[in-house]
Structure formats: C-alpha cells, structure tokens
Image (cartoon, helix red, strand yellow):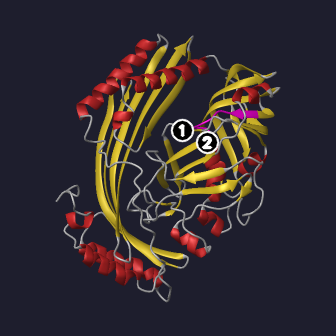
C-alpha cells in the first residue's frame, strides 16, 4: 500500500494497527523516562549536469522506523527498514534493555501545535524528470554563452519529500510532511592558463517552482561567474593579524560552527563545551545577540516539530553579549532541569536524535558596511566564506574565504586568493566592534554534520567588523 494515501498514517499504510503499535511502545517504555516510535518515508531525486552532459540522475526511496527508550543518561535504540508489528515488537524488546535495573518517571509529552511552517509540496512531482534535465542543459548553455572565458559549468538539482510520524507514549501520533529542494550552479573560467571557480545556490522547504524561474537561475549563473572572474584577478593574500569585515548572510556559517555547536545542550550537559557553566556570564561584545529559530516559514533549517515531536521555537542563546541559554532535546533538557527547545534532530529513522541547530544567526545592529570598511586602515573584507573546521571543546576554528579583498586605508582594493580566518569562537565574539544593519539569511544551502549525521540548516548574520583576527595567506 502507498503511504501517501490520504488519511492513512504510515503505520496503517504498512498494515499496522496504530493502537497495537502504541501498546508495544508502552511496554518498552514502562519504567523509562522517555522515548518514542519514529516512522519515516522518504523519496528523493538528484540531478548533476557536468562537463556538458547529464553526469548522474538518481532516485531514492526509503522507509522505516526507530524505537527509542531513554533511561537517565542511557538510551536504547533499535531501527528497521520494515514497518511491521513484528519488527516493532523486536525493536521494543531490544531498546528496552537500556532500562534494565532502572526505574524512572515518564516525562510529560511535548505540547501540541497547529502551526505549519511549510506546505506538503512534492518536489518530485513537478517539473517532470525530462523538464528537470532540460533545465540543467539550458543553465549550462546560458553560462557558456555568458563569457568566452567559461570553460566548465556544473549545475545540479536536488529535491526530497519526507513524511515523518512520531508516536508518543500517550498515544498521540504527530505527523509532519517535509519538502526540501536545492539548486546549485558552479562556473570555472580560464585566462592565460590560470583557472578559477565560483559557485552559488539556493533552496528551501517548498516545491522547485520558487527557485527555477528563469530570472532566478540566471541570477545564480551571473553570481557564480562574477565570483570566478574576481578570483581570476586575485593576488596572494598577506598573512598576519588584522581587522576583518565579514559580509552578511552565508558568513553566519562561522557563527554556526565556532559558537553554535558549543551552545548545544549535550555538550554543555557533559561539560565539554567552551561555554559550559557560563550562563549569565558575558561571552560576547555588547550588542551581540545570537538566536536559533526553527519556526521561520519555508527556510531550509525550519521544522514544524522536531524529531521528538516538540514544536520548534525561537531560542535566544546570547543576549546583548550575555549567555542566556542552550539548545535542547528532551533528554538534555530533563537532565539539566530545563525545558526542551525543539532542537532534537536526526538524519533519518536509522539515527537517534540529539540537540542540533535549525536556523542560527546573529541579530543586526545599526552600523553600515561602508563605515566598517572606511574605519579599517589595513584589513580583510571577506565577502563569502567557504568550508571550515572547529574544535567544540575550545571553539578554535579555521575557515577559508572563497571571495575576499584587501582593505587599505579605508578602501576595498585587490581581491585575494587563499585567505583563511584563524581564531576561536568565544574570543572572536568579544572582538566584534561593529554590527551591520543588513541582516540576511543564507540562500538555503547549508548542511550540518555532527556525530556522523547530516541535517539541513540555515545560517544568517549582518555584516560584522571583528578586530585582531589571524589571517592565513597562501601564494597564488
């Protein structure tokens, strides 16, 4: 039977009586603190056009469940790709081993919500397969015709529709249908034997329609080409300590990595974060307010409910420079005597949930980007960051810049190649001296990894001026 049949739960569509599943779950959770039966059906499609031809086109469909029993600090988890009463019963018996010798008090279930932050669109239904391929061909041809220096183009589309159901111990079945799409364009240019690249993309929780209108994808091509051409003229980046001006939007990835992970509840419960035990203390410059918000309509990191069934919300983490809270799933919140914040996330039914970010950002201020640059005698303007690495225990980070320029005597001058930012999140936050009035989110391309699990996220920030960051340079 098809799980998309109107009015049928994933359990019913698989021939399982929801009441019987509830009884099995109840037996597994007797004497435990918490737990749930998490069911999922996922369909996804991905297309990659590269080097003038369709390089890959894939379709994937999966369904299954995970049953979790939480007893204090311990959690038992069993999952299967077959949704049947027998499989659920076996999983319950296995997961229940976590509570041997334990006697807990069942936690109250998550509050109910009528909110919906996205529709139940099906990105696989439209456009048709052939139309998606034709669109990628059109993007490729358009990019190559845009500039004679273009030697390589990559274009990709990815879409998924994930149906999630969470059966709680009280018999409540929580359902969420989660669409997600993404488009990416990359352009490589060549001049005098030197090659450079630029890329961009966008997406969110809706059908493809909003992102594949001609004016939208043409703008992506032009932006990727612009970045590639800037990098073609880039000179070697000097190394040393200098003031750094960060552009708005995607650069919030530095905040996400260097600070956000350190504010997740599990790290703080275990005392392994640079921010552990510091609630109420100043951890950033005045004016710095950091939030996580899974309730923003349509955004890539948004969820109507998290993967335990808790409604998402806006959580202030740092307020005017003072640490005021962490992001929690139900387990970390209970063990720390706090309320869950709707931040329990898992990659799929085969994974246990843990505290994760959704859409994380820093609120805007009142400064102008032009003033930040004008006030900098010698520094770096990093328009766009690339990948980075962070150590959660101390917040130390290294981030590459994919588009950056020297600032000399208050003016943006030469583009530079090979620039990287080196520092640590906690001290970098204290060095923020100007906060822009131009807050924006990234265009919808973020993927966050933690403990081997990847989930879609959003990041955002205004332009910022940070004093005394170490800039690593590389010869062209």
Place residue 372 in its image quadrant: top right
Which image quarter holds the C terminus? top right
Looking at the image, can residue 277 be seen? yes
Q: Of 334 and 69, which appears nearest the observer? A: 334
49 sits to left or right of 403 = left
What's the mark number on residue 361?
none
Q: Residue 241, relative to residue 373: is it above or below?
A: below
- State how far apart marks 2 and 1 are (Cα): 8 Å
The part of the chain drawn in magenta is 244-252
What's the mark number on residue 442?
1
How dense is the environment of label 1, judged by Cα within 10 Å: few (below 14), some, or many (20 and up)? many
Q: Mark 2 falls on what kind of element? A: helix
Magenta highlight on residue 251: yes
Where's residue 298, x and y in %? 43, 45
Q: Which residue is mark 2?
A: 252
How dense is the environment of label 2, judged by Cα within 10 Å: few (below 14), some, or many (20 and up)? many
Q: Of 172 and 272, which appears nearest the observer? A: 172
Where's residue 253, x and y in %? 60, 43
Where's residue 458, x and y in %? 52, 45
Where's residue 252, x and y in %? 61, 42
Kindly check if marks 2 and 1 are in contact, taking CB atoms under 8 A apart as contact: yes
Which comes sooner in the sequence, label 2 or label 1? Answer: 2
Magenta highlight on residue 45: no
């Amino acid at each position: 039977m098809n799980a998309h049949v109107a009015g049928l739960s994933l359990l019913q569509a698989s021939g399982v009586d929801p009441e019987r599943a509830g009884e099995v779950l109840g037996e597994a959770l007797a004497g435990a603190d918490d737990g749930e039966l998490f069911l999922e059906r996922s369909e996804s499609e991905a297309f990659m056009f590269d080097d003038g031809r369709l390089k890959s086109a894939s379709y994937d469909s999966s369904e299954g469940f995970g049953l979790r029993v939480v007893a204090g600090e311990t959690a038992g988890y069993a999952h299967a790709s077959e949704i049947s009463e027998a499989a659920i019963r076996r999983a319950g018996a296995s997961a229940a081993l976590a509570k041997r010798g334990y006697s807990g008090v069942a936690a109250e279930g998550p509050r109910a919500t009528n909110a919906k932050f996205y529709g139940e669109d099906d990105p696989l239904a439209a456009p048709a397969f052939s139309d998606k391929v034709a669109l990628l061909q059109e993007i490729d041809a358009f990019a190559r015709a845009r500039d004679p220096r273009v030697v390589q183009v990559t274009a990709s589309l990815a879409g998924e529709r994930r149906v999630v159901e969470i059966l709680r111990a009280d018999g409540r079945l929580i359902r969420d249908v989660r669409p997600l799409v993404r488009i990416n364009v990359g352009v490589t240019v060549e001049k005098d034997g030197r090659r450079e690249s630029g890329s961009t993309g966008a997406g969110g929780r809706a059908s493809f329609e909003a992102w594949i209108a001609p004016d939208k994808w043409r703008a992506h091509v032009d932006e990727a080409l612009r970045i590639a051409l800037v990098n073609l003229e880039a000179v070697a980046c000097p190394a040393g300590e200098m003031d750094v001006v960060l552009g708005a939007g995607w650069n919030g990835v530095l905040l996400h990595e260097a600070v956000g992970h350190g504010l997740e509840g599990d790290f703080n419960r275990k005392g392994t974060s640079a921010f552990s035990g510091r609630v109420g203390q100043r951890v950033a410059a005045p004016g710095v307010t950091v939030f996580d918000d899974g309730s923003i309509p349509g955004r890539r990191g948004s969820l109507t409910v998290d993967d335990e069934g808790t409604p998402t919300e806006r959580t202030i983490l740092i307020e005017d420079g003072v640490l005021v809270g962490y992001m929690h799933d139900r387990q970390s919140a209970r063990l720390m005597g706090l309320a869950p914040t709707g931040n329990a996330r898992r990659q799929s039914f085969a994974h246990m949930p843990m505290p994760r970010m959704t859409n994380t950002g820093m609120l805007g201020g009142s400064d102008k980007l032009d003033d930040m640059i004008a006030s900098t005698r010698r520094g770096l303007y990093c328009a766009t960051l690339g990948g980075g690495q962070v150590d959660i225990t101390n917040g130390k980070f290294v981030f590459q810049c994919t588009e950056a320029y020297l600032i000399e005597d208050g003016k943006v001058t030469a583009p530079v190649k090979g620039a990287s930012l080196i520092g640590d999140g906690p001290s970098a936050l204290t060095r923020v001296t100007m906060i822009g009035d131009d807050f924006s989110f990234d265009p919808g391309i973020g993927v966050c990894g933690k403990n081997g699990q990847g989930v879609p996220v959003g990041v955002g920030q205004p332009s910022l001026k940070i004093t005394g960051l170490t800039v690593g340079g590389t010869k062209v």
